[in-house]
Amino acid sequence: MVKTEVWVEEAWQNIIQKINNTSRIIGAQFPHVSVEGKYECAEPHWWTAGFWPGQLWLIYRDTQDESLKTIAEACERKLDQVIMDYTRLDHDMGFMWTLTSVARYKLLGAEDAKRRALLVANLLMGRYNANGHFIRAWNPWFEGDENTGYAIIDSAMNLPLLFWASRETDDPRFRSVAIRHANTILDHFIEADGAVHHIVHFDPETGEKVESLRGQGYAPHSAWSRGTAWAIYGLTLCYTYTQEMKYLQAAKRVAHFFLSHLPDDFVPPWDFRLPADVTPYRDSSAGAIAAPGLLLLAEQVSSIEAHIYQRAAENILQSLYVNYGAWDDPQEEGLIRHGTSHYPQQKHLDNPLIYGDYFFVEGIARLKGDQDVFWS
Ligand code: GLY
């Protein structure tokens, strides 16, 4: 096995080279999924809009390459149209503005970026349902959609924007909404064995739980691997912001479930509980998201436990680099192959996904020594 430091540095150089090339093709757009080597771009309101500029900021932090900064700033400005389009804004504001405005504020101290992120944090806080103590996930995007009472596990990664806003403003409102939503995650999304539900439907008037729904997983009580990864990282971040042990314990429980279900190459299938007749496509993005979450988890625990999480994260990232990376194909715009976006809708079952790429880059940056993440 190659020594850790060597493969990490090699991976970082490959990332820089590929992103330099693709940045000239993609520019200030919002890539989502790479199909036959070309990234398809989504509209700015789509939840994935932050990941490309987020990647550019991670590279810029190391190389100071002004051309990447210029593109990331242009992406952030393009997102302004979304702020004014209430019907298309959903809870993924956290993903979108943490990796654009919060990132630019943290790296460059830009006051306009801070104001933008605070405005969006207010909008995210406004999605809180005080009856059920949850942040509403989506709006009714399609005729007939009724999702007023839906909350989803991905939201765990949107909470850092609220914690950040309280820290910046000394105003506890954002934080208390984040804490209430995080408690709802503990109460309704995490099973005793560490498996995670994607969607929980609450009655928006009484706040009572109605049902769990499969969402992007195979079944309501299966185990969607990307949701599990969102929970590992999101709950660990909740712990770092609050120092509340219950979030750390839940993050560990979910991490143990995740790690004990990994196949030999450390990269999960899209759902950990699939019947034999369903194709267990890999979801490389789930591995990529879990890895920096595990690295953060390793920093919160005793050295004996830390070793387990650190080693697991390194194994995942090294396998993604060696077995899934598209370094051998200069025509492929994605970095990491074999992501599964949405199996139940049969959408993008074996493709590079921008969030898989983003979290892989974040994980490698951390292994390389850049400890700060935009979520913290
Ligand atoms: N946040 C949606 C997903 O993970 O696919």
Image: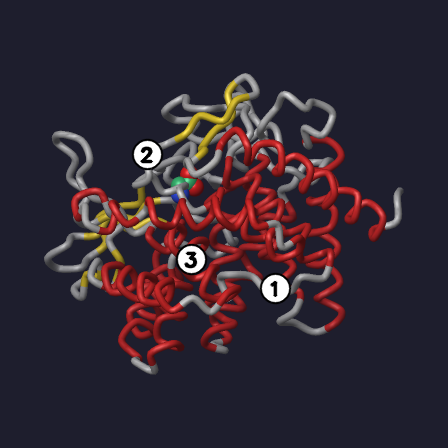
Residue 275's place in the image compared with 134, above or below, is above
Q: CA distance from mark 3 to mark 2?
A: 18 Å
| Label 2 CA crowd tier, 10 Å (few <14, some 14–19, many 20+) | some
Q: Which mark is residue 38?
A: none
The residue that disc 1 covers is 297
Q: Position of residue 183 (x, y in %)?
A: 36, 67
Q: Which residue appears at 47% of the width and 48% of the height?
A: 72
Q: Nearer the viewer, residue 144 or 262?
A: 144
Secondary structure of the residue carrying numbered label 3: helix
Residue at disc 1, secondary structure: helix
Q: Residues within 10 Å of mark 3 (few under 14, many from 20)?
A: many
Q: Quadrant of ligand 1?
A: top left
Q: Which residue carries the number 2 mark? A: 43
* Foreground label between 2 and 1: 2
Upstream in sequence: badge 2 or badge 1:
2
Residue at the image position 57 percent from the left and 39 percent from the top: 357
Place residue 301 in its image quadrant. bottom right
Measuring from the top left, give residue 76's x and y in whole percent.
Answer: 38, 50
**What's under tag 2, amino acid-wise?**
Glu
Q: Is residue 323 above or below residue 48?
A: above
* 134 relative position to 313: left or right: left
Q: Secondary structure at mark 2?
A: loop
Q: CA distance from mark 1 to mark 3?
A: 20 Å
Q: Is residue 239 left or right of residue 62?
A: left
Please give the residue where the numbered disc 3 appears in the rendered image: 98
Q: Position of residue 352 (x, y in %)?
A: 55, 29
Is the N terminus in the top left, top right, bottom left or bottom right quadrant? top right
